[in-house]
């Protein structure tokens, strides 16, 4: 997949980000949905899954940089985003669209049941704690670093579910 960078005036970019946040999506996810709607077609599930995987990898790289720079609150949110997007990637590959935190948790539970890997639920709960930390800043830095390793483990497990058996 090639990459496209779009330059927007500041106010338009802010509006895009506000609208995406209002509906609970990243700006990239929001643009993907708007494009699919505007083009009046469904985007193929493998295409959507690929976008989610690329975004998850991007957020994971950004989280690593933030951890190295000591910004544990921002790193927490990037780690959560990477985990949530990878869950969405697995769902998208199966033709499912997850819209809410509840949808994410239900899908992770179903993956755990399907694979017999209860660890998926625990690791995703860790990612959720990082999401909460972004808003409340209550986790000590060493815990955020430890949880970052758990999120990486979760992402590896989820990537394995994207591969054909």
Image (cartoon, rainbow, N blue to C red):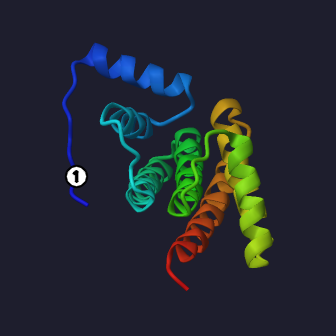
Measuring 58% from the left and 69% from the top, which residue is drawn there?
Answer: 158
Residue 30 falls left or right of residue 128: left
Q: Is residue 143 left or right of residue 22?
A: right
**Count of numbered circles in the view:** 1
Question: x, y percentage for residue 87?
Answer: 59, 57
Q: Which residue shows up at 73% across the image and 77% down it?
A: 115
Classify mark 1: residues with Cα within 10 Å, few (<14), some (14-19) or many (20+): few
Identify which residue is drawn at 38% across, 23% down.
Answer: 16
Q: Secondary structure at mark 1?
A: loop
Name the quarter where the N terminus is drawn. bottom left
Q: Is residue 139 visible?
A: no
Q: Residue at x 53, y 52 (%)?
A: 85
Q: Measured along the vertical axis of the image, is residue 89 above or below residue 31?
A: below
Label 1, on which residue? 3
Q: Residue furthest bottom?
A: 165
Q: Position of residue 15 (x, y in %)?
A: 38, 17
């Amino acid at each position: 997949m090639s990459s496209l960078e779009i330059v927007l005036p500041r106010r338009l970019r802010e509006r895009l980000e506000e609208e995406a946040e209002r509906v609970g999506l990243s700006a990239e996810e929001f643009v993907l949905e708007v494009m699919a709607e505007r083009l009046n077609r469904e985007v193929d599930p493998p295409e959507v899954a690929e976008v989610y995987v690329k975004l998850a990898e991007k957020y994971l790289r950004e989280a690593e940089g933030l951890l190295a720079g000591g910004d544990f609150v921002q790193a927490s949110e990037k780690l959560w985003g990477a985990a949530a997007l990878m869950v969405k990637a697995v769902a998208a590959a199966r033709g499912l669209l997850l819209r809410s935190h509840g949808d994410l948790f239900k899908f992770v539970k179903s993956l755990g049941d399907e694979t017999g890997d209860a660890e998926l639920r625990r690791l995703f709960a860790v990612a959720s704690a990082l999401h909460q930390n972004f808003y409340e800043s209550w986790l000590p830095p060493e815990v955020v670093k430890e949880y970052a390793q758990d999120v990486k483990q979760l992402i590896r497990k989820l990537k394995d579910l994207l591969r054909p058996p």
